[in-house]
Image (cartoon, rainbow, N blue to C red):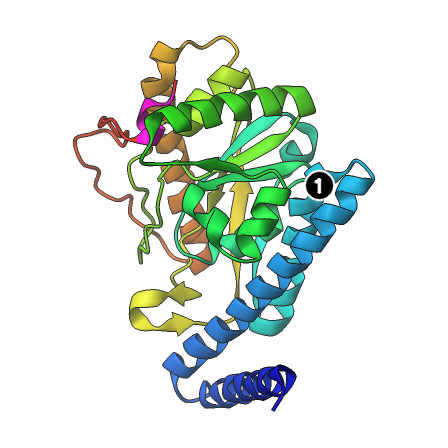
Amino acid sequence: MSALYYIETLAAGYLALTLVLYMLSLRLQAAGFYARLLVSYVALLACASYGVFISLFLRLFGYGGNAQWFVARAFKHIMLYSTGASFTVEDPHNYLSTTRPAVIIGNHQTELDVLMLGCVFPPYCTVTAKSSLKRVPFLGWFMALSGTVFIDRQNSTSARQAMAGAAEEIKKHQKIVYMFPEGTRSYAKEPMLLPFKKGAFHLALQAGVPIIPVVVANYSHVLYVQDRKFVAGNIPCKVLKPIETKHLKASDVDDLARDTRELMLREMVSLTAKARGEPVAMPAENPINGVVKASGVEATVS
């Protein structure tokens, strides 16, 4: 039997399983979780594959820097119609479209933040990612072709070089870079922020560009991995006023990171309360003031 036959059989089985799980989700929450998970994996693979080709195509016409925007929008629409999940972006002053170059920072909750990027991403925006993702078929190829800034978290020298290169790229091509200063996903049921690492703030200062905070409400009502919950829903996010960095020095980074985190945390609590229609308490904070002091890669980039 040909390889095509096995591929078609696998695809048919995958589709049948997904449909059965969707039907079971009317009675079982976990069935809906796994159904949407299966759909999300296919959507991500399809968009990554599309990204490889659109990156090559756009490069021919000098628009390679816009590849991630095209792919982000494709993922947004596929996920909306296949899972019912989406993000509504509140940007009344149109900061995302009018502030360029810039560094955008946002809170990081789960893998669903990939969809959030699909809704938030402005044109000529890229991301940073750990260097190990380069080896992932299709996704890694697309990220490399579309200008992703890869950082080796185990190699501080490489990280400094990557950040320096990113700063030059931002200034030269008037680009926007999206970063998650928490460094990892929180998977929290209530609104909270992990301590901020300082790489995004050093990068903004090094490039002399503003920081645009984007705050997403806690969305455990839509996706909460620990309870195997993944349902259709709309998640609000808000674009805050850009923070200028041209007048700041490297010694100001700690204060900048702490103040920005406090601002984002307050807005996250407010957005979550609005989404839930009920009051939400501010989380208790620990003594480190929300900024990483250890010498991790993102903390030591300068």
- Does residue 102 sit above or below 96 in this rendering? above
Q: Magenta: predominant secondary structure element?
A: helix
Q: Which residue is mark 1?
A: 66
Is residue 299 in the magenta section?
Answer: yes
124 or 269, nearer to the observer: 124
Along the horizontal axis of the image, is 288 left or right of 198? left
Point 43% across, 77% down: residue: 34
Q: Position of residue 30 (x, y in %)?
A: 37, 80
**Vertically, is 206 above or below 158?**
above
Image spot of residue 278 (x, y percent):
38, 57
Residue 63 image position (x, y, % from top left): 77, 38
Q: In which quadrant is the C terminus drawn?
A: top left
> Residue 230 versus residue 241: which sits nearer the camera?
230
The reply to whether the magenta stretch includes residue 256 is no
Relative horizontal placement of residue 66, taking residue 301 as reference (left or right): right
Q: Quadrant of residue 189?
A: bottom left
Secondary structure under tag 1 reads: helix
Q: Is residue 290 above or below residue 192?
A: above
Quarter of the view holding residue 167:
top right
**Relative side of 242 to 130, left or right:** right
Tell me the amino acid under the disc marked 1. Answer: Asn
Question: What residue sits 38% from the left and 61% below the top?
Answer: 220
> How far across and how far down the image is residue 145, in percent?
63, 43
Looking at the image, the residue that sits furthest to the left is 287
**In the image, which residues are magenta?**
297-301
